[in-house]
Image (cartoon, rainbow, N blue to C red):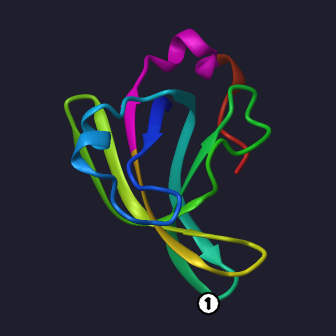
Amino acid sequence: MYVKACRIYNDGGAPMLRHDLAFAHPTDSGWLVCRDALDKRTGRMVKRAWLLNDDRTRNVYPPLCYVDSVFENGAIHIRGEERDDLSGKLTAMGWYCEIVDGRRHGQDARGPLPI
């Protein structure tokens, strides 16, 4: 689905301050994909989320292994961990996504997302 999104944690994984969170609004847009995927490091199936750019060729945010998602009033809150591919470090992260009508962005014409 096509969404507008923003991160709700700082780059270090710390929750944003209330003042900053009050002014956070979705500034990035792209295709949100959530599905089960194999984690190569642990050999287990995990829930993964990707936010791809408009032409579906690269990630807007690093992929997220998520543990919780809340759907409410046309918005999605996803909480989980981002893993740095080089160091293997896990960082707590959350995304706030507002759903946008995907038909205006060619969803029906292009078919399924390539993940």
Q: Residues within 10 Å of mark 1 (few under 14, many from 20)?
A: few
The quadrant holding residue 106 is: top right
The one of 28 and 107 positioned closer to us in this rendering: 28
- Judge left or right: residue 27 versus residue 60: left
Segment tinted magenta in the rendering: 96-108
Q: Position of residue 86 (x, y in %)?
A: 78, 75
Q: Is residue 23 magenta?
A: no
Query: What residue appears at the point 75 percent right and 27 percent down from the top-left corner?
Result: 55
Number of residue marks:
1
Q: Position of residue 23 (x, y in %)?
A: 31, 31
> Residue at position x 50%, y 74% from top?
46
Task: Kindly indicate the quadrant of the structure image that contains residue 37.
Answer: bottom right
Residue at the extreme top: 104
User: Which of the 4 image quarters holds residue 110?
Assistant: top right
Residue depicted at 33% across the width and 60% down the height: 15
Percent from the top left, x then y, of residue 115? Answer: 70, 51
Q: Is residue 100 magenta?
A: yes
Residue topped by disc 1: 42
**Residue lying at 60% horizontally and 15% vertically, measured from the top left:** 105
Q: Amino acid at mark 1?
A: Thr
Q: Is residue 62 above or below residue 58?
A: below
**Front residue of this view, candidates 107 and 9:** 9
Position above or below: 43 against 57: below
Residue 1: percent from the left, percent from the top?
A: 49, 32
Q: Nearer the viewer, residue 102 or 97?
A: 97
> Depth check: 36 or 62 in front?
62
Secondary structure beneath dot 1 equals loop
Residue 22 placement, left or right of 42: left
* Left or right of 57, for residue 34: left
